[in-house]
Amino acid sequence: MCNRALSVIGTRSSIASMNEASTEAQACSLHFEQACRAMLRLAPWSFARATGSGALIAASAGTPENQTGIVPIPLVPVSAANPAGTIPDQIVSWSYEYAWPQDCVRLRQVRNPFTPPATSGTVVPLWPGVLSSPLDMGAAEGLSLSNRVPYQISLDRDSFGNRIKVILTNIESALLIYTAMIDDPNLWDDEFSEAFVYALGSHLVGALIGDKQMDKDLWGKAQMLAVQARAVDANEQPLSPNHTPDWIRARYGFPLTGLMPYPVDNDSDFGF
């Protein structure tokens, strides 16, 4: 990838390793990771999709994980009515606080894990002959019957007082759907790789050549190729509903998006 980026800016040089002492290698080492993170955040790429259970940091008082109300508890939002952030606000406060995954570049969704039959909630039979497992829609737990599980990305402090990135939600044992930091080009789509070459090239121009117009042109081409790559990537993914109309949800006749016990990919809230 680095040598391809060097070729598009016309340096007529190549590197054998990003750890070598050459100016080109040092520039590639400096810009590769940030260029990769920026490209990964542009779209919900299928090759970078990861799913994992949230690592619980804190739970509010009264939850099964913290019935006695001991600290730590999730952050209490600061507002005009609660300037110190010390008075719990039942409308805007959160029940659970999860750690930001170490390899997470962008959070896509927080999902409620599938609840088996004979538990609380409104059980809805799915399409006969296709799926026979009922689905807990979470109504008894007071969850919003909407297409997205509410959550908020925020900052907190660890036990040593250091700033950490956290995810606040009301979902117990939440599943986190996110874009992982995939820096291995062997796992990338071909179209993504092509867009990345020009994105990295735009970074290397300033360090090696200093041509601002070339920098602008390369970044513009990277953006154009990224849009094309996103279209190809989206066409390869199975079509699934990413919006359930209110009149259908009101009849409880359709499973909620994000709570289906079968594979879907409805991460289309990236502006594409």
Image: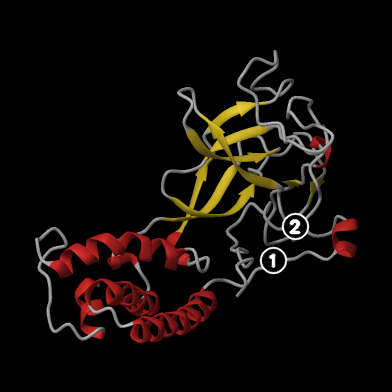
Q: Nearer the viewer, residue 144 or 164?
A: 164
* Disc 1 residue crowd, few under 14, some 14–19, many 20+, Cα 10 Å: some
Q: Nearer the viewer, residue 103 or 239?
A: 103
Find residue 45 and report its horizontal and vertical position in percent: 48, 67
Q: CA distance from mark 1 to mark 2?
A: 8 Å
Find residue 52 and report its horizontal and vertical position in percent: 50, 45
Three-letter code, disc 1: Asn
Residue at horizontal 60 percent and vertical 67 percent from the top: 270
- Left or right: 11, with 143 as reference point: left
- Locate the C terminus and report the quarter of the image it occupies: bottom right
Find residue 42 and report its horizontal and vertical position in percent: 50, 68
Question: Do labels 1 and 2 touch, CB within 8 Å?
Answer: yes
Three-letter code, disc 2: Asn
Point out which mark residue 3 bears: none
- Left or right: 37, with 251 as reference point: left
Q: Which sits earlier in the primary sequence, circle 1 or circle 2? A: 2
- Left or right: 249, with 118 as reference point: right
Point out which mark residue 242 bears: 1
Q: Nearer the viewer, residue 195 or 149?
A: 195
Does 147 sit above or below residue 91?
below
Find residue 250 and report its horizontal and vertical position in percent: 90, 57
Residue at horizontal 87 percent and vertical 62 percent from the top: 246
- Left or right: 251, with 146 as reference point: right
- Which residue is labeled 2 in the image? 147
Q: How is the image coloured?
A: secondary structure
Q: Of helix, strand and loop, which one carries label 2? A: loop
Residue at horizontal 30 percent and vertical 64 percent from the top: 31
Residue at horizontal 44 percent and vertical 64 percent from the top: 38
